[in-house]
Image: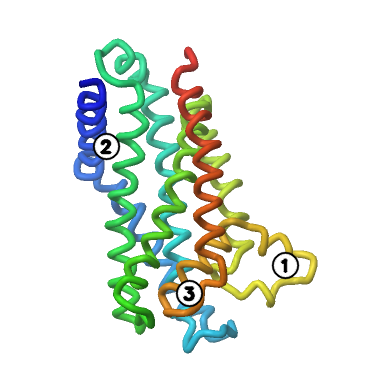
Amino acid sequence: MNLRWTLHDSFIMTRRNMLRYIRLPENLVSITVQPIMFLLLFTYVLGGAIRVTTPDYITYLLPGILVQTVVFGAFATALGLAQDAQTGLFERFRSLPIARSAVITGRLTADVMANIFVATLMIGVGFLIGFRFGGSPLESIASPGIAILFALPVAGLFAAIGLTARSVESVNVIGFVAIFPITFISSAFVPVESMPGWLQPVADANPFTRAVNASRALALGQDTGGDVTATLIWTVVLLAIAIPLGVRAYNRPR
């Protein structure tokens, strides 16, 4: 019975967070327009100047933009939780007979569903400008799938930040300072080999690089070279860190 009510409460919280996208359309615009702009600008403005190992730049770029987009979605998790905390909504939730885990679970589930929608949209736009999958149907599904999976623990980490930060503005500062170096010092937009020698080990060690390489290899139907395994390991490790931090941050008195 406890599990049943926990699942029920999580469903209600997921529904609440999904309704926010409908009632506040600017939230939906922010997670769709920005990645499309990145995709088009990098493809048509910078693509001709970047040498890649794939047949064309859009084939190289789309998996990287896809992983970047779903990781940026984790930033929205922190902002949403910070807004709820700042308005005193969590105190209201604590006074209700609901599972405490449902608040965070519902938010993360809603964000995963939003990521699935955004990934589908990005692949559709990619097809319009020349992107094509080179692998089997299963690999084509696994390519965005592993990106969404990798974004889950990142969202958990940002959930802890959103629950701990003193204001929405501080979440904005922390989020951008953390996300931009991680996403750009990687293989998302350019090959790691094109970076300065001192920066290449940093990019290689970046878990974001492993996720991008895994998604790209699956999209092209190539050997992943252990990148899928590395991404799964990073996902488990980050989840092991994110879950305790998130629970502790939520239970912390304000």
In the structure shown, which secondary structural element does the residue marked by tag 2 occupy? helix
Q: Which residue is mark 1?
A: 200
Residue positioned most to the top = 95
Q: Which residue is mark 3?
A: 217
Please state if 231 lies on the left or on the right of 202 as rendered: left
Q: Which residue is mark 2?
A: 17
Q: Are marks 1 and 3 in contact (CB under 8 Å)?
A: no
Q: What amino acid is labelled 2 in the image? A: Asn
Front of the two marks 2 and 1: 1
Question: Which image quadrant: the N terminus?
Answer: top left
Q: What amino acid is labelled 3 in the image? A: Ala
Please state if 249 lies on the left or on the right of 131 as rendered: right
Q: Earlier in the sequence, mark 1 or mark 3?
A: 1
Please state if 249 lies on the left or on the right of 191 as rendered: left
Q: Nearer the viewer, residue 116 or 1?
A: 1
Q: Residue 145: x, y in percent?
A: 37, 60
Q: Residues within 10 Å of mark 1 (few under 14, many from 20)?
A: some
In the structure shown, which secondary structural element does the residue marked by tag 1 occupy? helix
Q: Residue 42: x, y in percent?
A: 49, 74
Front of the two marks 1 and 3: 3
Q: Earlier in the sequence, mark 2 or mark 3?
A: 2
Report the Cα–Cα distance between label 1 and label 3. 20 Å
Report the Cα–Cα distance between label 2 and label 1. 39 Å
Q: Residues within 10 Å of mark 2 (few under 14, many from 20)?
A: some
Residue positioned most to the right = 198
